[in-house]
Image (cartoon, rainbow, N blue to C red):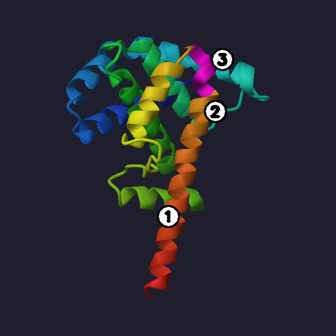
Amino acid sequence: MAKEKTFNALFSSIKEAIIASGSKHSDRWCGMLDAYKQKFFSTYREINYYVKSNFMEDTTAPLDRHKCSACFMIAAMMSFKTAEQSLEREAMAICIGLTVLRTFINDKRDSSDAALSAFLDKRNGSFVMPDCICDEHNFIKNWASEIHWAYKQYEFVLSLANELFLIETFNKKELEIEILKQGDSK
């Protein structure tokens, strides 16, 4: 079962990240988070339980950071209503998911996480997104559009968890490239 203490700590990180983003939606998003915090938590708890029950052998183990982040994203999709075609809700869900993932990376601080955390710190805590080769939109816009059209209750958790894992892996590869370039310049 999802712990309220953990949820509250992540909730605070999410609000801080939204404020720090400087988005034109920051005030509205923080207001929605405050107004619907209990609904958001109960929805997250429900999704967390569903994922553990249906996709994990050990239902008492905590979710990995990618599944947890995906659960937060879907809870946001289910808890907050915005204009249907604006993709604002989806953008907010992405911001929430990446913030939760970043928070876990910062908290674990094992050897690979420490290096990745430092790499992200150099980019103001932001993940590097791959370039899109299929159209003129950026990765986040394309991802928001995908979430909008694919979103169906809880079945989307594993897909989102996989994308979050791939974003983290992409950033680890970017870090390796940066380290190699630094070695070449010496």
Which quadrant: the C terminus? bottom left
Q: Position of residue 68 (x, y in %)?
A: 56, 31
Residue 4 in magenta stretch: no
Q: Position of residue 172 (x, y in %)?
A: 54, 58
Q: Position of residue 29 (x, y in %)?
A: 28, 24
| Amino acid identity at mark 3 | Tyr
Looking at the image, is 67 positioned above or below residue 177?
above
Does 178 sit left or right of 33 as displayed? right
Residue 114 is at least partly visible in this image:
no
Task: Tell me if mark 3 has few (under 14), some (14-19) or many (20+) residues whose alpha carbon lies within 10 angstroms of its own.
Answer: some
Looking at the image, is 9 positioned above or below residue 135?
above
Q: Position of residue 81 (x, y in %)?
A: 35, 12
Judge depth for marks 1 and 2 and give the one in front: 1
Query: To which quarter of the image does residue 39 belong?
Result: top left
Magenta stretch secondary structure, dominant? helix
Q: Which mark is residue 63?
A: 2
> Which residue is labeled 1 in the image?
175
Alpha carbons under labels 3 and 2: distance apart = 11 Å
Does 177 sit left or right of 33 as displayed? right
Looking at the image, is 55 positioned above or below residue 38?
below
> Which residue is labeled 3 in the image?
50
**Which portion, as a residue range, is magenta?**
153-157
